[in-house]
Structures are given as structure tokens and as C-alpha cells.
Image (cartoon, coloured by chain):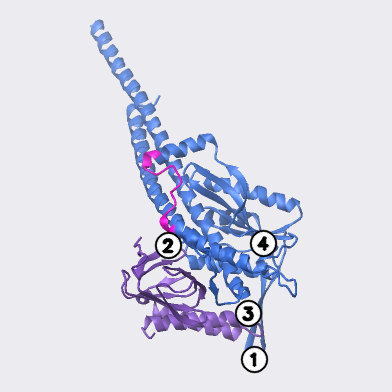
Amino acid sequence: MANVLDLRRRIRSVKNTRQITKAMKMVSAAKLRRAQERAMQARPYAQMLTNILESLVRRTDLYNNETGEIMHPLLVEREEKNVLVLVIAGDKGFAGGFNSNIGKAAQRFIDQRRADGQNLDLEPVGKKAIGLYKKRYPAAVYEHKEELYDNDLAKHIEDIRHRVAPIEVAAEHPTLLVKTDFDEVTAVANSIVDRYESAEIDSVYIVYNEFKSVISQRVVVEKLLPIRKLGSHEITVLEEMTEEQREAAGRAARESGVSLSEPEETVAEREAKKFGTADIDYLFDQAPERLFRHLMPRYVTTQIFHALLESIAAEHAARMTATDAATKNAGELIDKLSLTMNRVRQAAITKEIIEIVSGAAAL
Amino acid sequence: MAEAGNNSGLLAVRLVTPDRVLLDATAAAVELPSMSGYMETLYGAAPLLAELGAGEVRLHGGSAGEQTFFVAWGFVEALPERVTILAETALHPNEIDPAEAQAELKHGEALWNQAGDDQEKYDEANAVTRVAEEKIASAQGKH
């Protein structure tokens, strides 16, 4: 049996761990509040952009009357042969099942698509997802071609894709979760839009952890392209929270002072819903085709931005719950060890008394 | 929010960026860089929806005072009593980094040189150049 000194050392070490997990919980709670606020503040812009597009769709035909062509390439539906999947996980661990849940759910989706005979391009976001897919699948190979013409005055640059495997990692985004800068998201979205327009890919999905509130989260796959209906999220749920997880998350949130309910709609958000929808004849000074061309890629950007912000909030919530559970476990362990230590100490004292008493009796 | 009364003669102005609502105030007049040139909206003007290009949004009078924002792309809804501006980027002129703007200008020129015979790439290069030029002008207060 361990002696008192050993037990005392162990208790001290567990106490230190508890202090660390407690601090991590408070930090995650603060970060979660900030992430939630950020997601809220981003809503009016996305809402307004959707409103303009909807208003445009109402006012104009989606098909050209003369040629019968669809107004924008992002609305064109093709047979899904090459599918792009954006997988958003986290940058760090210590978040319970957050990263592994997304990994498992995404894998199911990938396997099922592969079984249907489709080729897949993966684009992991966050260090955890990148680490996972880099080991599992080869990176896409591009051949860089530069061609000079017009007496060497102009240059034509092209990257040609050579597919070597049915599932490849087309690109990775390790910095997207650090600041989640809108310009950076725009660059990613534009690259995806370009590939869709040039028919390199036929559909785009995004796997991420949707966040409504601390106790209402789920891993979903959302269809990003082609756009079927503006302003609605075409979502398939891959994994829901269990009752047990919900309870643990609820307890962690209550102890950290994080609200359990969904945040209420702000004035700005309410006003944003009215943007461009007044029942009057607006003056439109540009041609609808042109407006469409400018608005559609931005719509895709806001959808990705939205998914990123939700995933970040979900990651902090998961870390808060995980570290709360760790703190609780550490507390229980300390109680158990203290009890054992007291018993051992008592046993030692009893033993000494017996020795003294029997020594005295022998005299 | 700062409420513009119906007879105050002031416009309620809201400037929204992807990150947040940047400004919520009232103004007597708002100048906007629409795609087809600068325009000014006043209280009671006809309803209008317009796409904004690169340039400056300027507010005059009201609670906003004299304020200027550089916007790269956006959309505006002007109603008789309210102006809502949707801007992809909105910066105060003193927030602009001239060195970065110069680098963007160079990037735009490089794109133009590489565009080859692709009209779309030319348009894109021109757009990048125009944003950079407007940014530089805004930073120098040349408007």
C-alpha cells in the first residue's frame, strides 16, 4: 500500500491539474461568449445579401428568354462526378469528442460518396482535420504551365490537374480558424467558385459543427453548390448530441455563466430582414446579369463564413464542457485520495500505538 | 439606435460590414460611390437600390457629423427616411495602410499583364487596380 507521502504528492499533482483545467474552462467560456457575439454580429450582412439576391430573383427571370441559358453558372446543376468536401474541425485538442466526431461523420459521408462511384476532393480546415487527411489521402497534383505569346509580351498561366487517386486533398487551410478574416474566406470561396464554374467540380459540400446554443449542437453536412434555393441551408444531420452530452454541456455553461438559450434577435438583425424588401419600385441602375455576377460568389463566401463562425463557437463550447468534466473528475479523485490517505495515516498511528502498548506490556 | 423622426429631415444611416454593424447614426446627406458614379441622397429621396464600387461614403450633418469611410464593394438601399449600406470592406481613411495599397496596385498590374486573352481576367485585374487606386487616393485625402 502506498505510504502517506506518496499519496500527499499525488493529491498535490491532481490539485494542480484541477487548477489548470478550471482555468481552461474559464478561458473557453470567455472565448465562447466572444465567438457567439461575433456570429451574431455577422448575421445582418448575410441576411441583407440574401435579401438583395431574392429581390433580384423576383424581379428578373433566372433564364435568358432568348438563349434559354441559366442566369448564373452557380445555379447550374450537373451530374455529381467530382465532389468537393470542405471539412471544418479545430486547431487544438482538449475539446472532448469535437474533432473526432467531425472526423467520423465526414468519413461516413466520404465513404458513401465513394461507394456511389464519385471522385472526391477534400479541403480540410483547421490543423486537426489537415493532420487527419494528409496521412490518409494523397495531395492533388497540379502541373504549372506558363506560355508566352504576343512576342513574349503577354503570359498565359494555367495549372492543370492530374488526378491520381479517387480521393485527394485538393487544398488545406491551416490559418482560416486563427483570425477568420473575411478577406481570407473570400479567397477560399473564390477559388471554389472558379473550380465550379470551370466544371472541375460538380458539387460542393461543407461538413461542420453547427451551433445554435451550448446545448443544441450537431455535426451537419451542408450543400453549398449548386445553389438550389437562396437563403435556406440545405442541411443533412450526421450526428446529434446525446442527452448525456447535453446535460454535461448545460452544467458547464451554468457554472461558467454562459447563457443556455439561443441569443435573441438584435434590432440590427430585424432591420436587416427588411433590407431591399419594401413594397415599392426601386430604381435599379445596373443590369441584373451584372448584379448577379457580383453577388453570387459573395453569397457563397458568406455561407462559408457563417459555417466557420459556428464551428469556432462549437469548438469553444466543446472545450468548455470537456474541461468542466475534467475539473469535476479531478475533484472526485482528490476526495478519494484524501480518504485513502487518512486511512493509511490512521492505520500507521494505530500500528504505532499497538507497538507501544505491546512493548509496555512486555516490560 | 439613433431614431430619425419623421419630420426631422435627417436620414437614419446604417453601415453594415461582414463582421458587424459599423455605424448606426443619423445624417443630413450621404454621398455614395455607386458603380455609375458618385451620388448623394437626401431626406425624402426616391427609393433606390444600387451597387457600390470602390470609393468613399461620406456623411454630412446629423449625429454622425462629418465622417468618411472607404468602401471597396457594396450595396445600398436608399429609402426616403433611411439609408442602409452594405459594404464588404469599410475603413476609415486613416486605417488604410498606404504600403499595402501600393502592393495591391502592383498586384493588379501584374494580373493585368498575365490576363492573356481572357476578358474576365482583365475585368478582375481592372477591379483590383481600381480598388487599390481609390484606396491610395482615400488615404491621401484626395477626393
Q: Determine the chain carrying the residue at label 3.
A: B
In front: mark 1 or mark 3? 3
Give the CA distance from mark 1 to mark 3: 21 Å
Tell me: residue A68, above or below residue A26: below
Chain B: its colour in the image is: purple
Disc on res. A152 = 1
Q: Which residue is mark 3?
A: B120
**Camera sees residue B124:** yes
Give the CA distance from mark 3 to mark 2: 31 Å
- Label 3 vs 2, first from the N-terminus: 2
Question: Are the two marked residues, 4 and 1, in contact with CB atoms closer than 8 angstroms?
Answer: no
Q: Which residue is mark 4?
A: A226
Boundaries of the magenta span? A254-268
Comparing B137 with A12, the one in front is B137
Few, some or many residues within 10 Å of mark 2 (<14, 14–19, 20+): some
Comparing B39 with A33, the one in front is B39
Where residue B134 sits, quadrant-wise, is bottom left
In front: mark 2 or mark 1? 2
Give percent across and percent down for residue A31.
40, 51
Considering every residue shown, the one lying at the far bottom of the view is: A151
- Tags 2 and 1 on a common chain: no
Chain identifier, colour blue: A
Question: Are the two marked residues, 1 and 3, in contact with CB atoms closer than 8 angstroms?
Answer: no
Give percent across and percent down for residue A207.
60, 53
- Tags 2 and 4 on a common chain: no
